[in-house]
Image (cartoon, coloured by chain):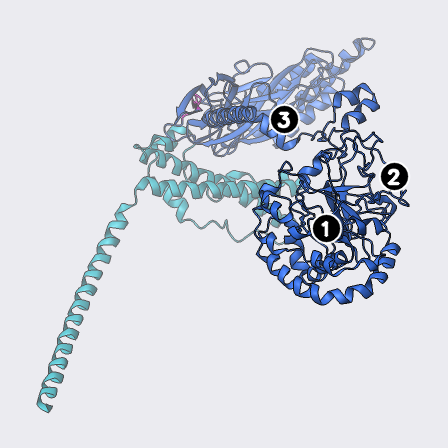
Chain colours: A cyan, B blue
């Protein structure tokens, strides 16, 4: 009787060990495969985004940006004293005016990934530190800065939309 | 800016008084010099000074020469109204001229670009119409600020407008969309409008230079409100929820991403064809179905209208009075109506019914040995047999002779006699009782009475006969000595449960021998105690046992049975017993006297009166005066039982004093026709 019981218990323990081993192996397999799968998915997803979608999203962002800048400029204009207009510096004195940007359509369409765009994007849009000390000068300088920004954002937006249209040859409704 | 301001300053100086030519010259000079001196600012200033002096001289000269002429003034200040670019490649500016000052005025537009000081004049004044300046592609630079000024010039001077700064990219307003097409299309049976258009041909959307978003508006013909739809960048749009058969107006416009809305395109008209609404078919089905059901219901109603009418409006029951004639009533003759109500057989006045009603009969059995002794009593005074066997009520006619007091008197007199007879009668009664019991129950009275008054009968039976030995069965001698009671009423008081004196008189063939020439005489009078005879007792012992051997009394019902016996009611004793006596019929009793026939017992009323009914062939009369020729003191009126019981109907006890063929006139007393079987009804 006792011997039988011992044998039974031994058998049971053996079974349990085997089971646990199998489980561990299965876990390893699954983890390895999981890792591989995740890597593959990441690779696939990166290239899965079409350029047209990217450009579309970029142009949407730039569009919003320009709209915001336009709104701000108009608000500031309403608050601006008429005399300040005379004093307002010209837009040509924008710090970004030195960048050669296309001035007409032909030029604009010819540019693809020109250095101008890169330069604009890289440039921090601060316009220097000299806004001024008094309120009027501050306001005038800020207003000027906003006008510069408005133009530049429009340039970016137009450029992106041209690119978007170029990239979406399969989707004519984009243009 | 500064250059412009100097120009304007000079021109105002000149324009205050100067002539046109001077101004013009000045302008031209300044312009020409401007071209030059724009490049060389120093020379410009010197030349300007010179010009100013010349102009002043000339203007003074001119002014003085035309001092008295009409007021002329230099032109008013023009104003730039707007500048627009349709495709971001060209643009046009419009201005509003001021007053011309009475002199022909010319306008000029000057602009200056952002980075240079060069003033340019408008290259094209005509393309865009009056007071406009059109800038073509060559002259248009984008993302460049333009400073534009308009100058109005007349002979007296020129006027500059306020400068305007514009950037082409901000003033884009495209042309309206072109080739707007609207068509009706169908989607699962439901129509919709499909609107499609094209961008304005000038706008370069293909390269993405301009990004346009569209908007369209729709309205039904005749309405005022437009329905706006933003279409985005698509060039096609669907409109649903249309009204069938309606005409729609459609317009489209566009806007660049950062610009102004275009004008609305020209209206496109479209008519939506009539289409069958799917929901209407369901309603049509429902209406048809309900109409069908309605028809069925009306048909059912029509079929059952009669029963429904009965249910809702039950018929009024008509009168159910027998003999009631509505027509008579309508005619208005009430007498006829009421007479019609009188049915011939109501109230029952004839005695014919009584025969039907009366099932009773009196059966009196007389032993044969008594036969001889029986004699007819001629002294039977009248006795008014009230044989009103009134079945209808208890108040049947009672014998007028039956006054309670009278009975009491008789009773008292008899008491002494009775006792002696009681013993005999009791034994006899017992025997009789047995016989009674053995009889068949055709005697309904017995049936009815026997349970109730078994002892009573026992009592009464002998009592009935007890006086007989006293009086009755004696021959006529006795009779003559009898004082006939004035009332020979057979009252039904004899037959109450208390003291019954039921007896049956049954003449029949079977009993013939028993009765034989049974002329027996029942005397009701108790005033002759001396008439008691022993043999009367024997007489009294009527062998009732022989009754037991009788035949079925059914046969006895027939009145016409052999010989007819006649019994006469002598009196009613104090014990409410009817004492009968047979009547001797010599040559044959008058069967049916025409006048009266008291052969029938009507019944027993509540006062224990045997009511005998008198048959009268003729109509009955209430009072029954009788002709008492024999009775001595029995000139008694035939009192109807109504004497005792006034509620009684007149008994049929009237008789007409018809001459009787018989010698002996039967008194107007009732007699009992033994041939007639009758049962005494009980109440």
What's the chain of the residue with tag 2? B
Residue pointed to by mark 3: B46
Residue pointed to by mark 2: B628
Say whether disc 1 or disc 3 marks the residue closer to the N-terminus: 3
What's the chain of the residue with tag 3? B
Say whether disc 2 or disc 3 marks the residue closer to the N-terminus: 3
Position in image of residue B133 (x %, y %):
55, 19
Residue pointed to by mark 1: B373
Answer yes or no: is residue B497 visible. no
The span picked out in magenta is B192-204
Left or right of residue B57: residue B413: right
Dot 1 lies on which element?
loop
Q: CA distance from mark 1 to mark 2?
A: 25 Å
Position in image of residue B434 (x %, y %):
60, 60
User: Relative to B358, does residue B211 appear above or below in the rendering?
Assistant: above
User: Relative to B227, does residue A5 appear above or below in the rendering?
Assistant: below
Task: Have a look at marks 2 and 3 and say if they share a chain.
Answer: yes
Say whether disc 1 or disc 2 marks the residue closer to the N-terminus: 1
Looking at the rendering, which quadrant does residue B641 occupy?
A: top right
In this orientation, which residue lies closer to the viewer: B177 or B395? B395
Position in image of residue B590 (x %, y %):
73, 34
Is the residue marked by circle 3 packed among few (<14), some (14-19), or many (20+) residues within 10 Å? few
């Amino acid at each position: 009787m006792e011997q039988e019981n011992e044998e039974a218990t031994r058998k049971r323990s053996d079974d349990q060990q085997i089971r646990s081993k199998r489980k561990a192996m299965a876990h390893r397999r699954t983890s390895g495969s999981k890792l591989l799968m995740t890597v593959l998915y990441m690779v696939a997803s990166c290239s899965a985004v079409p350029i047209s979608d990217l450009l579309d999203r970029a142009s949407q962002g730039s569009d919003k940006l320009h709209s915001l800048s336009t709104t701000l400029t108009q608000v500031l204009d309403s608050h601006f004293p008429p005399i300040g207009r005379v004093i307002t510096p010209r837009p040509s004195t924008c710090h970004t005016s030195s960048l050669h940007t296309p001035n007409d359509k032909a030029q604009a369409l010819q540019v693809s990934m020109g250095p101008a765009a890169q330069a604009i994007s890289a440039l921090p849009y601060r316009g220097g530190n000299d806004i001024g000390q008094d309120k009027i000068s501050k306001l005038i300088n800020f207003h000027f800065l906003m006008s510069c920004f408005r133009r530049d954002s429009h340039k970016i937006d137009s450029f992106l939309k041209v690119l978007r249209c170029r990239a979406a040859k399969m989707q004519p409704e984009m243009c | 800016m500064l250059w412009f301001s100097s120009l304007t300053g000079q021109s105002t100086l000149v324009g205050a008084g100067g002539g046109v030519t001077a101004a013009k010259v000045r302008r031209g000079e300044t312009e020409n010099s401007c071209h030059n001196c724009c490049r060389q600012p120093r020379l410009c200033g010197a030349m300007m000074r010179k010009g100013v002096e010349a102009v002043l001289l000339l203007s003074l000269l001119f002014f003085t020469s035309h001092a008295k002429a009409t007021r002329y003034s230099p032109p008013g200040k023009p104003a730039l109204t707007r500048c627009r670019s349709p495709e971001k490649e060209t643009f046009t500016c419009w201005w509003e001229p001021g007053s011309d000052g009475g002199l022909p005025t010319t306008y000029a537009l000057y602009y200056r670009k952002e980075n240079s000081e060069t003033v340019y004049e408008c290259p094209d004044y005509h393309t865009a119409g009056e007071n406009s300046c059109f800038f073509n592609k060559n002259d248009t630079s984008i993302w460049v600020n333009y400073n534009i000024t308009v100058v109005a010039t007349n002979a007296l001077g020129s006027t500059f407008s306020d400068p305007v700064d514009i950037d082409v990219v901000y003033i884009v307003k495209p042309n309206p969309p072109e080739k707007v097409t609207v068509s009706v299309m169908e989607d699962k049976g439901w129509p919709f409008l499909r609107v499609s258009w094209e961008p304005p041909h000038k706008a370069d959307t293909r390269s993405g230079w301009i990004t346009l978003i569209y908007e369209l508006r729709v309205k039904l013909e005749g309405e005022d409100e437009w329905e706006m739809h933003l279409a985005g960048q698509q060039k096609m749009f669907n409109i649903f929820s249309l009204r069938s058969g309606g005409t729609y107006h459609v317009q489209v416009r566009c806007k660049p991403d950062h610009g102004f809305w275009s004008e609305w395109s020209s209206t496109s008209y479209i008519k939506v064809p009539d289409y069958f609404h799917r929901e209407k078919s369901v309603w049509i089905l429902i209406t048809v179905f309900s109409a069908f059901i309605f028809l069925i219901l009306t048909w059912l109603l029509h079929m059952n209208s009669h029963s429904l009418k009965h249910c809702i409006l039950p018929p009024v029951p008509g009168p159910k009075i027998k003999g009631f004639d509505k027509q008579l009533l309508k005619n208005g003759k009430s007498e006829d109506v009421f007479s019609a109500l009188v049915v011939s057989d109501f109230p029952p006045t004839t005695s014919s019914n009584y025969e039907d009603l009366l099932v009773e009969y009196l059966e009196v059995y007389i032993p044969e040995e008594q036969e001889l002794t029986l004699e007819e009593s001629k002294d039977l005074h009248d006795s008014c047999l009230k044989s009103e066997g009134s079945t209808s009520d208890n108040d049947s006619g009672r014998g007028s002779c039956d006054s309670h007091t009278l009975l009491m008197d008789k009773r008292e007199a008899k008491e002494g006699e009775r006792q002696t007879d009681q013993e005999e009668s009791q034994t006899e009664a017992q025997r009789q009782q047995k016989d009674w019991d053995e009889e068949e129950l055709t005697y309904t009275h017995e049936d009815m009475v026997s349970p109730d008054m078994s002892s009573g009968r026992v009592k009464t039976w002998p009592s009935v006969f007890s006086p007989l030995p006293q009086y009755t069965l004696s021959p006529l001698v006795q009779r003559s000595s009898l004082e006939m009671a004035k009332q020979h009423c057979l009252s039904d008081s004899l037959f109450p449960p208390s003291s019954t004196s039921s007896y049956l008189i049954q003449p029949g063939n079977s009993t013939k021998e028993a009765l034989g020439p049974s002329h027996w005489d029942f005397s009701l009078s108790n005033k002759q105690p001396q008439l008691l005879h022993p043999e009367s007792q024997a007489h009294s012992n009527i062998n009732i046992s022989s009754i037991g051997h009788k035949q079925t009394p059914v046969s006895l019902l027939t009145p016409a049975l052999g010989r007819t016996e006649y019994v006469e009611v002598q009196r009613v004793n104090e014990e409410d017993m009817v004492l009968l006596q047979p009547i001797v019929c010599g040559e044959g009793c008058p069967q049916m006297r025409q006048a009266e026939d008291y052969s029938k017992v009507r019944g027993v009323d509540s006062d224990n009166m045997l009511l005998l009914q008198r048959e009268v062939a003729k109509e009955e009369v209430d009072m029954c005066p009788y002709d008492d020729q024999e009775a001595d003191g029995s000139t008694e009126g035939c009192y109807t039982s109504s004497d005792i019981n006034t509620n009684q109907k007149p008994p049929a006890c009237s008789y007409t004093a018809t001459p009787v063929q018989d010698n002996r006139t039967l008194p107007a007393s009732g007699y009992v026709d033994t041939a007639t079987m009758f049962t005494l009804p009980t109440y």
